[in-house]
Image: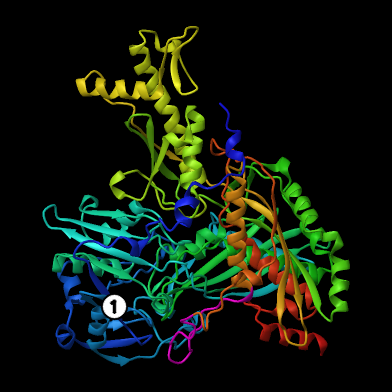
């Protein structure tokens, strides 16, 4: 079987219809009789709701209905917060307060929905929302996680004293014993590097905001939700739990998605209210978030502080790593929000380095802010940032060259599989080769000459590296299905949703290669919970490895079934049947039946009762984590008189395992690096400390990277196959976001000696200018 085609760059199947404007996004498919929703949202970070008067709103022309928590209570809607268990210290558990879809007696963040107005038009719904009168009694609020932990801080939830949702002791088998060992190593070490790092809160700002169309079929008693999601079944399962109905009483469909990045994985308040509203009025209800609305209603990301220490001996050998991490959950527990700051982050450690002692502990904190949840990386950027920033600090305090220090502590290839102090096992990796290729691509040796050229122009120049390693995969279970609809076509059905990852290009091609048919004969299908295929959403760089594994096994099972059918049809023993070039044949003869002929016969045989199942095949597999890694190098150029800076160059060499398509992987790297650049140098969600108002609720105040801000990226790959899945692939979608922030901030540290290492993200002109002034002083 020839699979080399998958490794060649190609034109994406999706590009043709998307570039012609033929895609179907959320607003592109209005339903007959559709109404429109507008939400009344809290203007307060914390307030008691004394009353809600909807009488004036119901008199507005075109208003159909107003939904408040009363209707949701009547429908017995459950807790919107859904999260896997997280074990706390001394038997404690993650505190998960009730999150209503529409607020009841109290609001806990600016933008929390209080009521939903349904109108014949959006304008009518908006006018109705303006007419809803809500009486609030404002209460003290706290938006900063460090302030929230202080004695006397306003309490977000009475059941969470000190605003602590969970005090997590780490992944060590005996956390206290590990902590004692690390403490002893710190006290006896020649050098101890210490940094405090702020992972600022940011917004996802996807190109297409969130939106949905909800409807209800009274005859079948089934809810229908057409929504931009990262997996229809994952969304369906969550929504069913919130609505308190069986899975078969709600159907979720998803078509094109204009950017997701973790934002569109789980349930949101709006979707629940819309479904209840659609049931009440007997008509579809549509809603698309406005951009300003998205800044206060979409899940936010990051918002954490880390105290990090690294112990070294006199020769630079890493002895122990300690991290005390504090992560804001916002006002409610968002989708896997606590997991981001605990296990998801910690499993990226110790990165590429051989560190025997690791003590990583986390406190998850409630604040009066929008909930936080996954955004490209989801804990991985925080882990990499902590590790690579403290390694750079270790180089500074020890006087050892930062590259030599890193190389000295790399895990050698011969150590694979490598069991980490965290408890994970790296199945594969050639870190030294990745590093050498990365430094060569960046022309690291020629940096001094470039620094001199910048100096001639009155500019400072710095170089920074990030030796990045992350885990990919997350949820191990995933299924796929092959269906023969008739003729010479095969439909390949997936649970995972394509949100820009080119599933329709990659998977039909791989299926066709393995079956010896044309890619045009394979139809890609996804985005419908009615497919009932096991698995989770497109998150955590998991699709290629988990769905790819299921695809391989599905094709194998299909061929095995086909051989039995072909043996009967060709009157031969099953052992004499071979499959080759799209057909089943009897070995040593010219007797053959095409794949599609056998599939057609199988359908006839099943219809007659001769066989229990036809050639339609569904397989579910479990796939362990993989560990993508890379060497990213950034250079920044700084004007010390103004603080204005630019990313002068960026190069990346990544080991994503076997590459299925170089063009698509390069696109994933470029996009994720751009997002990392945004966090490092521009983006920050800011709340007023007194009122709790968000001060960055538009692109006038929230800076986003543009094409002109970025250099032409240089990227290459080192293909070290994963040993834990049949394709040998690792994740590729989050490497740039995970690596870029450390590489860029380390470059600022190098550019501004003595003070650049104190700059916290984002490296705005003001911060950089102050660092330059401190250096000059």
Q: Quadrant of residue 9?
A: top right
Query: Does the magenta run of residues contain 695?
Result: yes
Residue at 38 percent across and 85 percent down: it is 45
The image shows residue 714 at horizontal and vertical percentages of 71, 57
Q: State whether the magenta stretch is mostly helix, strand or loop.
A: loop
| Label 1 neighbour load within 10 Å: few <14, some 14-19, many 20+ | many
* As drawn, 468 above or below 675: above
* Residue 685 image offset from top left, x and y in percent: 51, 79
Q: Let me know if residue 580 appears in the view.
A: yes
Write down the region rendered in magenta: 681-698
Q: Quadrant of residue 373?
A: bottom left
Q: Quadrant of the C terminus?
A: bottom right
Position in image of residue 313 (x %, y %): 79, 62
Q: How many marks?
A: 1
Task: For residue 386, say whether it is visible.
Answer: no
Quarter of the image holding residue 448? Answer: bottom right
Instruction: Based on the picture, tell me whether residue 44 belongs to the magenta stretch.
Output: no
- For the residue pair 83 and 257, the one nearer the viewer reads as 257
**Mark 1 — residue?**
39
Q: Position of residue 270 (x, y in %)?
A: 30, 70
Out of 467 and 397, give the one closest to the viewer: 467
Q: Name the element at disc 1.
A: strand
Task: Please identify the quadrant where the N terminus is shown.
Answer: top right
Q: Is residue 678 left or right of residue 95?
A: right
Question: Vertical placement of 217 versus 678: above or below?
Answer: above
> What residue is at 67 percent from the left and 86 percent from the top?
766
């Amino acid at each position: 079987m020839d699979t080399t085609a998958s490794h060649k760059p190609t034109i994406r199947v999706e590009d043709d219809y998307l570039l012609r404007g033929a895609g179907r996004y959320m607003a592109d498919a209005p339903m007959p009789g559709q109404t429109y929703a507008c939400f009344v949202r809290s203007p307060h970070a914390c307030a008691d709701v004394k009353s809600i008067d909807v009488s004036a709103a119901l008199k507005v022309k075109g208003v159909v209905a107003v939904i408040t928590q009363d209707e949701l209570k009547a429908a017995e809607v459950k807790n919107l917060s859904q999260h896997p268990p997280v074990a706390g210290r001394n038997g404690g558990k993650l505190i998960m307060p009730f999150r209503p879809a529409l607020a009841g007696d109290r609001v806990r963040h600016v933008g929390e929905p209080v009521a939903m107005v349904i109108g014949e038009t959006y304008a009518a719904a908006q006018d109705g929302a303006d007419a809803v009168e809500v009486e609030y009694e404002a209460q003290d609020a706290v938006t900063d996680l460090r302030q929230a932990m202080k004695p006397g801080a306003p309490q977000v939830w009475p059941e969470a004293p000190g605003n602590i949702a969970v005090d997590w002791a780490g992944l060590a088998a005996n956390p206290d014993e590990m902590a004692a060992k690390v403490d002893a190593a710190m006290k006896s070490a020649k050098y101890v590097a210490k940094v405090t790092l702020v992972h600022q809160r940011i917004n996802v700002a996807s190109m297409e905001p969130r939106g949905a169309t909800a409807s209800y079929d009274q005859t079948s008693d089934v809810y229908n939700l057409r929504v931009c999601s990262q997996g229809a079944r994952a969304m369906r399962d969550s929504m069913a739990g919130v609505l308190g109905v069986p899975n078969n009483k709600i159907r979720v469909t998803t078509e094109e998605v204009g950017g997701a990045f973790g934002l569109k994985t789980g349930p949101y308040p709006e979707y629940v209210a819309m479904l209840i509203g659609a049931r009440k009025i007997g008509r579809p209800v549509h809603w698309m978030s406005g951009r300003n609305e998205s800044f206060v209603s979409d899940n936010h990301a990051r918002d954490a502080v880390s105290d990090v220490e690294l112990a070294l001996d006199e020769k630079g050998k890493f002895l122990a790593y300690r991290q005390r991490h504090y992560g804001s959950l916002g006002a409610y527990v968002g989708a896997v929000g606590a997991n981001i700051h605990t296990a998801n982050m910690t499993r990226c450690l110790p990165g590429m380095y051989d560190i025997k002692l690791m003590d990583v502990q986390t406190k998850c904190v409630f604040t009066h802010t929008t909930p936080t949840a996954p955004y490209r990386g989801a804990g991985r950027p925080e882990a990499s940032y902590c590790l690579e920033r403290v390694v750079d600090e270790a180089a500074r305090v020890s006087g050892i060259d930062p590259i030599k220090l890193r190389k000295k502590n790399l895990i050698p290839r011969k150590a694979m599989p490598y069991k980490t102090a965290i408890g994970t096992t790296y199945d594969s990796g050639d870190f030294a080769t990745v590093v050498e290729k990365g430094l060569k691509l960046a022309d690291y040796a020629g940096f001094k000459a470039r620094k001199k050229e910048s100096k001639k122009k009155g500019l400072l120049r710095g170089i920074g590296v990030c030796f990045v390693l992350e885990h990919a995969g997350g949820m191990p279970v995933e299924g796929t299905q092959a269906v023969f609809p008739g003729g010479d076509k095969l439909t390949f059905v997936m649970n995972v949703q394509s949100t820009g990852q080119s599933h329709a290009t990659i998977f039909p091609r791989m299926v066709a290669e393995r079956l010896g048919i044309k890619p045009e004969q394979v139809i890609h299908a996804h985005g419908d919970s009615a497919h009932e295929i096991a698995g989770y959403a497109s998150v955590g760089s998991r699709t290629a490895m988990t769905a790819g594994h299921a695809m391989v096994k599905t094709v194998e099972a299909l061929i095995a079934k086909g051989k039995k059918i072909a043996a009967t049809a060709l009157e031969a023993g099953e052992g004499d049947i071979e499959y080759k070039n799209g057909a089943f044949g009897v070995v040593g003869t010219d007797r053959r039946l095409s794949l599609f002929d056998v599939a057609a016969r199988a359908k006839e045989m099943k219809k007659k009762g001769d066989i229990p199942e036809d050639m339609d095949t569904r397989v579910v597999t479990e796939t362990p984590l993989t560990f993508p890694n890379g060497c990213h190098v950034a250079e920044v150029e700084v004007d010390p008189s103004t603080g204005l800076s630019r990313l002068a160059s960026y190069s990346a060499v990544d080991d994503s395992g076997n590459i299925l398509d170089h063009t698509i992987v390069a696109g994933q790297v470029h996009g994720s690096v751009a997002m990392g650049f945004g966090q490092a140098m521009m983006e920050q969600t800011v709340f007023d400390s007194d009122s709790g108002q968000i001060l960055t609720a538009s692109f006038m105040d929230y800076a986003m990277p543009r094409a002109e801000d970025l250099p032409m990226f240089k990227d290459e790959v080192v293909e070290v196959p994963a040993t834990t899945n049949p394709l040998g692939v690792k994740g590729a979608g989050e490497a740039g976001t995970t690596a870029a922030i450390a590489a860029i901030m380390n470059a600022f540290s190098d550019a501004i000696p003595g003070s650049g290492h104190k700059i916290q993200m984002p490296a705005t002109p003001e911060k950089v200018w102050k660092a330059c002034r401190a250096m000059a002083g």
